[in-house]
Image (cartoon, rainbow, N blue to C red):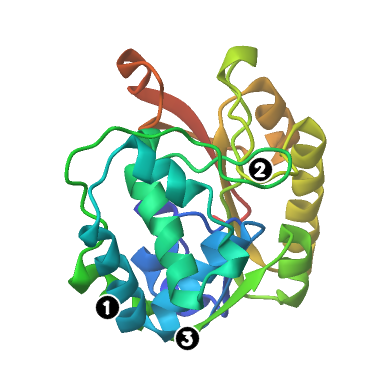
Amino acid sequence: MEPYLPEPNSIGTYFEPFLGGGALFFHLRPKHAVLSDLNAELIHVYTMVRDAPDALMAALDAYFEFRLDEDYYYSVRRQAPEKLSAEARAARTIFLNKTCFNGLYRVNSKGGFNVPYGGYRNPTLYVRENILAASAALKGAELMVSDYRAACRKARRGDFIYFDPPYDPLSKTSAFTAYTSEGFGERQQKQLATLFRSLDQKGCKVMLSNSATPLLESLYREYAPVRLKAKRAINCKGTGRGAIDELLVMNYP
């Protein structure tokens, strides 16, 4: 993706409305950023990493006092995050992500985390140096629990927006069960394409990554999407974790 990024000195504020793991944000480390996601637990984790990394790591250390097994995992999964302290709530999210099946994040229709136990032995919950580096990178970032459309309302000419939405499924059987309780289907993909054009007309630099499906190729045909090979890391079958075609859409040279 590096060759397709705009020149760092040519952009104003960086926006990433589907934050997820924030890989591009942490690669760019922009001075000014608006980072958002509908996943409130994820944004809470980033907020704690930014504002209270030591308290978060202390809460994570508390998990080492217990023997990790299936019963303990499900007891943590059953906890109501809103009843926990700020640091314990963020630590719970990280613990579940590191110990659940395949590192997935999936919720049911009520928003409850429902990924089964992963069965790992001695998983690493965090690396201190990484938490502190992420905390430093996030200092200049505004973090929001927000719909992508609302998050982009502040975008102005010269800002850079990167969209990494839930991917359009390559087949009916490959659809991922909800990352948020709202889901993200064909209607939402079309709405996102409309916003992409609106930001383009506003003079923003916009990049989007998604699956190389007929729907996506049709929605962004005018921007001449670039086809790239990307490794898919999460699949129930090991043979399904190879390189697949993805689309990279940009409105700038």
Q: Amino acid at mark 2?
A: Tyr
Label 1 packing within 10 angstroms: few (<14), some (14-19), many (20+): some
x and y percentages locating residue 213 in the rendered image: 62, 23
The residue drawn where x is 32% and y is 22% is 242
Quarter location, residue 64: bottom left
Judge left or right: residue 239 versus residue 191. Answer: left
Q: Is residue 248 above or below residue 126?
A: above
Q: Secondary structure at mark 1?
A: helix
Does label 2 or label 3 sit earlier along the sequence?
3
What's under tag 3, amino acid-wise? Gly
* Position of residue 164 measured from the top left corner of the image (x, y, whole percent): 56, 49
The one nearer the camera, 113 or 251, is 113
Q: Which label number is shown at residue 140?
A: 3
Q: Nearer the viewer, mark 2 or mark 3?
A: 3
Q: Is residue 16 visible?
A: no
**Secondary element at image label 3:** helix
Q: Residue at x 30, y 18 (%)?
A: 238
Q: Is residue 58 visible?
A: yes
Q: Secondary structure at mark 2?
A: helix
Tell me where residue 246 appears, x and y as whole percent. 49, 32
> From what the image shows, is residue 89 above or below residue 49?
above
CA distance for labels 2 and 3: 31 Å
Residue 72, label in figure:
none
* Numbered-mark total: 3
Mark closer to the observer (3, 1):
1
Residue 3 placement (x, y as % from top left): 37, 53
Q: Nearer the viewer, mark 1 or mark 2?
A: 1
Which one is earlier in the sequence, the residue at label 1 or at label 2? 1
The residue labelled by disc 2 is: 223
Asked if the residue at tag 2 contacts the one at tag 1, i.e. Cβ–Cβ closer than 8 Å, the answer is: no
Disc 1 residue type?
A: Leu
**Residue wearing tag 1:** 132
